[in-house]
Amino acid sequence: MKDDKRDRVDGQFPYIKLFPEEYQGGSLHYGCSLEERGFFVDLMCLAAKNRKERGTLSLEKDRPMTITMIANALFINEADCQRLLKTMEQQERIHYRDTGVIVLTKFEFYQKKYRRSHAQKEKEQKVAIKRTEEARLRQLVNKYPGLTFKIVQTDFGYDVLNKKTGELLESVTT
């Protein structure tokens, strides 16, 4: 696949996230027909590709896409597009700005949620590593009572040395 910078949004390829558990158990799945679900997922894809303002169907910040443009982009007829947009508005999945720009109501919330959860996951991994290291230190203190030891970082883990004699007590690979 060719990496075309014109296909990128904010320096990254546009994406949407769709968690199967939440999708199949959420209001979009049980509250919409198959046609409406497919239409909304297509709207999410279209809104994700918007270079000016993700989560909206606009050509520029305040210049809306017309029904014809949306229908053509989604390969459906205009009457169906109009009807489905009306349904999405009634279900509060989209709303219109005063300028006519269509906004997917919770688009940014779900996109930011991914970024937060990724950062949260990294934080949790660091905490888990720190807890593991602390637990390992407690084991060493219990294994060598009364000894003062020194931990030296190596390429493959760390060495535990007797601080007074420099004797290698054990080598730990991480």
Image (cartoon, grey):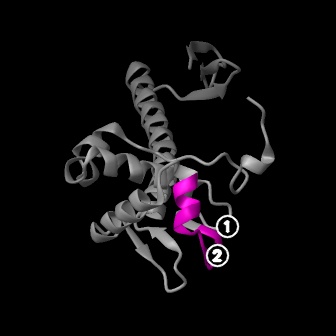
Whether residue 156 is visible to the viewer of this picture, yes or no, is yes
In screen coordinates, is 95 left or right of 13?
A: left
Query: As displayed, is residue 46 above or below residue 155?
Result: below
Q: Amino acid at mark 1?
A: Lys
Q: Amino acid at mark 2?
A: Lys
Query: As displayed, is residue 33 above or below residue 140?
Result: below
Residue 34 placement (x, y as % from top left): 29, 44
- Whether pointer 2 and pointer 1 mark residues with C-beta atoms closer than 8 Å, the reply is yes
Residue 158 placement (x, y as % from top left): 61, 22
For image coordinates 61% across by 54% down, the residue present is: 49
Q: Mark 1 packing: few (<14 Cα in 10 Å), some, or many (20+)?
A: some
Looking at the rendered structure, the secondary structure element under dot 2 is loop
In the image, which disc is placed on residue 170? none
Residue projecting furthest to the bottom:
98
Q: Give the camera-side residue of 10 and 130.
A: 10
Q: Quadrant of the C terminus?
A: top right
For image coordinates 26% across by 41% down, the residue present is: 24
Residue 154 placement (x, y as % from top left): 69, 22
Q: Give the camera-side residue of 124 and 15.
A: 15
Whether residue 116 is visible to the viewer of this picture, yes or no, is no
Q: CA distance from mark 2 to mark 1?
A: 6 Å
The residue beneath circle 2 is 61
In screen coordinates, is 16 left or right of 95?
A: right
For image coordinates 62% across by 48% down, the residue present is: 14
The residue beneath circle 1 is 52
Q: Mark 2 packing: few (<14 Cα in 10 Å), some, or many (20+)?
A: some
In screen coordinates, is 101 left or right of 159?
A: left
Q: Is residue 71 magenta?
A: yes
Q: How many marks?
A: 2
Q: Give the camera-side residue of 128 and 35.
A: 35
In screen coordinates, is 152 left or right of 86?
A: right
Magenta extent: 58-72
